Amino acid sequence: MKTTLTAETLLQLDRLGAVSLAPDGQEAVCTVSQVDLKHNRMRSALWLLPLHGGEPPRALTTCGQRDGAPAHAPDGHQVAFTAEREQEGSKDTAPQLYLIPRRGGEARRVSHYQPGIGAFRWMPDARQIVFIAWVWPDLKGEAAQNRRQEAWNQRRASGVVTQETQYRYWNAHLPQGRVAHLHLLDIRTGKVTDLFENSAYELPRDEPGLNCFDVSPDGKTVVFTHDPHAVKAGGQRCELVQLTIKGRRFKRIAHHERWDFQAPRYSPAGHDIACIATPVHRTDTPYGHASYGRLAVWPTSRAFRPSDARAWQHDPLPPLQWEQDGRALWFTAEAAGRCHGWRYERASGSFTRQVHGGWVQGLAVQGSGESATVLTVRDSAQHPARAYARQAGSEQRVERFNDELLRTVRLGLMEERTVKGALGEEVQLWVTYPPGHRSGSRRSALHVIHGGPYSASGDTFSYRWNPHVFAALGHVVVQTNYHGSSGFGESFRTSILGRQGQLELLDLKAANNWIRRQPWCDPSRVYAAGASYGGFLVAWMNGHWRPWPKGPIRAYICHAGVLDRRATWSADSYTQRHKDLAGTYWEQPERLAAQSPVEHAARMDTPTFVIHGAQDFRVPDHNGLAYYNTLKARGVDARLLWFPDEGHWVLKPHNALQWYAEFESWLVRHGARRSGMA
């Protein structure tokens, strides 16, 4: 007999991650993560996925706990990956680079670099690797970096000391006193060379990764993104710089005061370069960071020109993937609550959707045209991520990791609806029904409001806010893609800048009116929950909508929500918030107050469950604690779930189980019925 989807079931699912397609297109390697309840963490391994002959996947690594970032060597004989392991009596204190033969065998550690090995790319000769590491810019040589890192690891003091404008990101402090450099690792000797040593160059500090750089096909140059501002901070305009490795010569190849450049990729012949170029405006205007990027391609023999960037109705997302003949590029882009795989043909300038989402989470291409092998990892609201290979126009799944478990699970129907929202524009709703829902059944309704705001609810599978888990409790779940959501056009996304909360509230009101008109709706049992910007919106709703029973919402759940816009300046992203809000709290206090839920605390009378993590640097936890304390001081029914060891997301498995259990308990306390009962 089939069961409903539960939080416990979610933790049993295998999670497909990064993929690497072999140069011959015959097989792929992907990371597969699993929950380790005993040790309260995730662990990951590499799996080989044959793309021909119907062979089943097989584990390529089994010894590590965090094996990840697989990448086939250009000659196809071996796979590089990063891991923290104990090997030959030496235990890694930071991720190191390992190699394993493509056909299997023992993995061997290649690097012994104490600062660790970050995102990497192979050099075309398969003898070297270019990688990212955070290093002390005042030191010279591998040995000096190793000594300083070893001393740092032995320190007893825990204080964070900084003079940097950006010093933390999401749930971690940036390495103190260090910057992100590109390095060269010799596979045979393990020798590490800092390519940026004795220069002022560094990679952007907000999560430098694989999309920050590329290696030319001849191995002579590397292109990378660089923040040219004297004061480094997240969200600033970046340029592209090309480094000639021999002689260490740097040259700016994309620099423009009104454009930001990201995700550079050389063409296979090395004659052209592609990137995502985004038009930006002055920093005193609330625009630019939310605008759409454009696909730009130009010859490496000259610098970027604005005419090289091609406007499109969607926002291209990295990474960019070239076909082997250089005539086309592949990438992903969102469209109306889905994320598809797209192909850009240079000759015609046309964009065509080649892979239909769900949500394409990973994409890799080998070959050209109709003969190209296209590997995708994609999910939908009906299933977690799966791997597919398309060759010669025919596509097949190449793994069955979760099929046996999912055969025991029954999911409810999910449908797409629209309502007329703010500005008279159509707003998308995703509606998920409990399994076995019958017409005539009276149900509670649960708004699940996405964060961002420049993201979207969609046809995708979530582990943290899974609508099927909520629907299995008996609710009809409604997810609204309010103004500001991505995938519905640039003007729709940027419409909320400088007036956050206004249009979104009208959209949520329209969604709520639609809910109350449905024959299945029990109007006495309508709830709303949201995280991050969704948490901001439920706090905003609490201060603007009449309290229950005269108002429409019986109880709220606010996870990691913004309460006080002035306190936004304690967040890691404070250098960008004036763009969202069209001002600062010291220069435009009235404008900021008009977008701050705390200004409406006197009207917050609806019961609220507040959740926050102490390690949340994106929305620091004083927002949640102040919200809870305010409600308590005003005599409003409130409950707090505070995690000392979590950040913006609840990631530890046992904490996730507690989160789901407390979520359900709060709704039951306020009139919801348990176990999927109508």
Image (cartoon, rainbow, N blue to C red):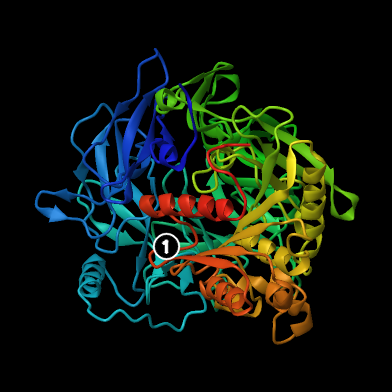
The residue located at (75%, 32%) in the rendering is 348
Residue 537, given in percent of the width and then of the height, sits at 69, 62
Q: Residue furthest bottom?
A: 586
> In the image, 136: left or right of 277?
left
Q: Amino acid at mark 1?
A: Glu
Q: Position of residue 451 (x, y in %)?
A: 62, 56
Residue 241 in the image, given as x and y percentages of width and height: 53, 60
Question: Extreme top residue here?
Answer: 53
Position in image of residue 518 (x %, y %): 79, 38
Q: Nearer the viewer, residue 506 or 347?
A: 506
Q: Is residue 164 visible?
A: yes
Q: Is residue 63 above or below residue 534?
A: above
Horizontal side of residue 121 vs 592, given as left or right: left
Using the image as rendered, state which of residue 343 and residue 196 is in the foreground: 343
Q: Quadrant of residue 416?
A: top right
**Residue at x 19%, y 31% (from the top left corner):** 105
Crowding at mark 1 (Cα within 10 Å: few <14, some 14-19, many 20+)? some
Q: Is residue 504 above or below residue 632?
A: above
Q: Of all residues shown, which one is farthest toward the right? A: 424
Say which element carries label 1: loop
Q: Quadrant of the N terminus?
A: top left
> Which of the image's four quarters has the C terminus?
top right
Q: Is residue 588 visible?
A: no
From the viewer's perspective, tell me whether residue 8 is left or right of residue 489.
left
Picture quadrant where residue 287 is located: bottom right
Rendered position, 660 above or below 252: above
Residue placed under numbered mark 1 in the picture: 646
Q: Is residue 588 above or below residue 546?
A: below
Which residue is depicted at the point 34% across and 81% down? Answer: 159
Residue sitting nearer the eye, 551 or 30: 551
